[in-house]
Image (cartoon, grey):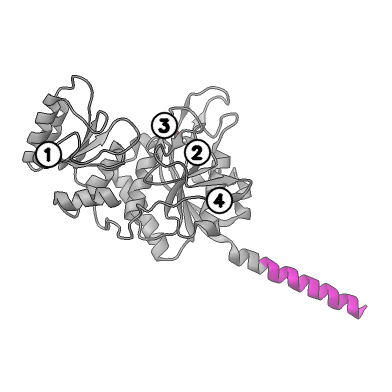
Amino acid sequence: MRKIQQILFAFLFILHVQGQVTKENKARIIILATGGTIAGSGESSTKSAYTAGKIPIDNLLNAVPEMYKYADIKGEQIAQIGSQDINIETWLKLSNRINQIFENNEADGIVVTHGTDTQEETAYFLSLTINSKKPVVLVGAMRPATAMSQDGNKNLLDAVMVASSPESKEIGVVTAMNEEIFAARDVTKTITTSTATFQSRNFGPIGLIYDGKVSYYYKTLRNPAKKFNIKGLKTLPLVEIVYGYADAKPSAIIAAQNDRAAGIVYAGMGNGNFNASAGKALENASKNGIIVCRSSRTGGGRVTLYNEVDDKALGFIVADDLNPQKARILLMLALTETKDKTIIQDMFFNY
Ligand code: SIN
């Protein structure tokens, strides 16, 4: 009898220790909610009409109890909006809160729920302003939480797995959706309604999530250790995007100048090209101290310096492979530090 008691005690002791180890090994994840379709609510499970950002964080967490197997999870509501309404103030708030969480060692990783429309912009902004290599995983959904075959719950579970995976320890800011992981600087929304909307046209996904396993294949080298310091900032310098097209008039460039923009990102044709009238207006803007950055409306490839355009003579810089909306973010942040075109161009070739 005594022997049986001893065996039972030993067995219970092992279970207890194992339980502790499992708990201690669980990553601490904070989910910061901002709204979007992942928190969207519609009147019907089969119709496409819905309102983004309706469902609060607690309901999102309750809908995916499977997450707690992988991590100790807390939720915080940062905003409750469609990502079309994300602005610089929300970016600063989000980035400052994430920096604070990591400085205070409150979490091992962070998941940000976010609409897909501007998710790539927020991801890139965070990747340039967060002083930690710890995982920050942005996630969204293409179908609202109330839809039949909604994609949000699975995406959220996958994002938590990415944020808590030992493989992600130094991955920094990524997006995880539709079982694919993308680097913040490379990801872009490519299709208006498909669940496979996130792509990196130039480089593809850096990793995959399947059956509870996170696998990485590549890492971006464009992730400099030095981040922009946004502490105390209330806003960023004004940078406008102007779209290029056949027979474009210079009015949008002149308007940006009149609004005292510090920079213009030109979403040019092909390799960042413009017609004669836009070119004249851009040259004039550059002569007046506005940083003019040529990017491309094509959605892929690089805009190259001094090839089709005499950037030196015109005083322009190029966005390299950043799309216009990401080039705007880098230019706004760069302008918080310097107006030196050589230094800013260097950032575009390294960030
Ligand atoms: C949004 O970006 O908030 C709306 C669209 C989406 O989340 O897919």
How many residues crowd around disc 3 within 10 Å: few (fewer than 14), some, or many (20 or more)?
some
Which is closer to the viewer, label 2 or label 4? 4
CB of residue at label 3: within 8 Å of ligand 1? no
Q: Amino acid at mark 2?
A: Ile
For disc 4, the marked residue is 215
Which is more foreground, mark 1 or mark 4?
Answer: 4
> Which is more N-terminal, label 3 or label 2?
2
What is the distance, in whole Å, between disc 2 and disc 3 at their CAs?
A: 26 Å
Give the amino acid type for the residue marked by disc 1 in the picture: Arg
Q: Which residue is mark 2?
A: 55
Let me know if residue 30 appears in the view: yes
Q: Look at the image and give the residue range highlighted in magenta.
A: 1-19
Looking at the picture, how far across and down is residue 73, in whole percent? Answer: 54, 55
Instruction: State the residue in front, 324 or 40.
Output: 324
- Indicate which disc residue 156 carries: none
Which amino acid type is marked by label 3? Thr
| For marks 4 and 3 on the same chain, the one whose residue lies earlier in the sequence | 3
The secondary element bearing badge 2 is classed as: loop
In what quadrant does ligand 1 lie? top left
| Residue 16 counted in the magenta span | yes
